[in-house]
């Protein structure tokens, strides 16, 4: 199915300008680790939810610290890679003038993603090695993260 010219131009412009937005975030980080929000679930139960460490993982990704991002929350770098792939795919489809469809994300894939998130949330709370590696790093006073 063909896309009209204005939609194609807008998608192309957004695709071309997106690296500049990424550069702005990388060059001028807006968050500092001591000011990151605390997880209400972790504060209440002492357990790590599947999202615990996600904000710190995103911050690590913006600073290029990929291993620290994986150590804070292994799901976020994978999700960021998936979003980047989808963004590039959508940009290429827009450049070609065709519609981008998410036909690969059917019900089975959605159930598998939800199941993976639940299993990850369970495994990161097991108190023995190697599952303790899935727990997020704790920020210290000086801003450096520690296991």
Image (cartoon, rainbow, N blue to C red):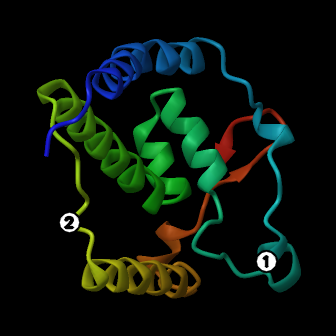
Tell me the crowding category of disc 2: few under 14, some 14 to 19, or many 20 or more residues within 10 angstroms, Cα based.
Answer: few
Quadrant housing residue 52: bottom right
Kindly identify which residue carries mark 2.
103
Quarter in which the C terminus is drawn: bottom right
Q: Nearer the viewer, residue 107 or 26?
A: 107
Mark 1 sits on what residue? 41
Residue found at x 54% / y 81%: 121
The foreground one among 56 and 98 is 98
Which residue is drawn at the image coordinates 53% and 30% (left, top)?
Answer: 62
- Single out the residue that lies furthest toward the front: 4
**Would you identify the image quadrant in which residue 129 lies?**
bottom left
At a point 41% along the width and 76% down the height, the residue shown is 130
Residue 147: tell me if it is visible. Answer: no
Q: Height in image: 68 above or below 135?
A: above
Residue 50 in the image: x percent, y percent? Answer: 57, 73
Nearer to the camera, 17 or 127: 17
Tell whether 57 sits left or right of 35: left
Name the side, left or right, on which 83 lies relative to 3.
right
């Amino acid at each position: 199915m063909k896309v009209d010219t204005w939609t194609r131009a807008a998608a192309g412009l957004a695709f071309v300008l997106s690296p500049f937005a990424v550069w702005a975030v990388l060059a001028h980080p807006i968050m500092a680790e001591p000011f990151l929000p605390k997880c209400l679930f972790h504060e209440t139960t002492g357990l790590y939810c599947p999202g615990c460490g996600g904000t710190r993982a995103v911050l690590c990704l913006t600073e290029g610290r990929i291993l620290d991002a994986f150590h804070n929350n292994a799901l976020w770098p994978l999700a960021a890679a998936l979003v980047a792939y989808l963004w590039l795919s959508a940009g290429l489809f827009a450049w070609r003038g065709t519609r981008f469809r998410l036909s690969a994300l059917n019900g089975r894939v959605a159930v598998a993603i939800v199941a993976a998130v639940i299993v990850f949330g369970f495994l990161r709370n097991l108190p023995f090695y190697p599952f303790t590696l899935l727990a997020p790093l704790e920020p210290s006073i000086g801003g450096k993260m520690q296991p």
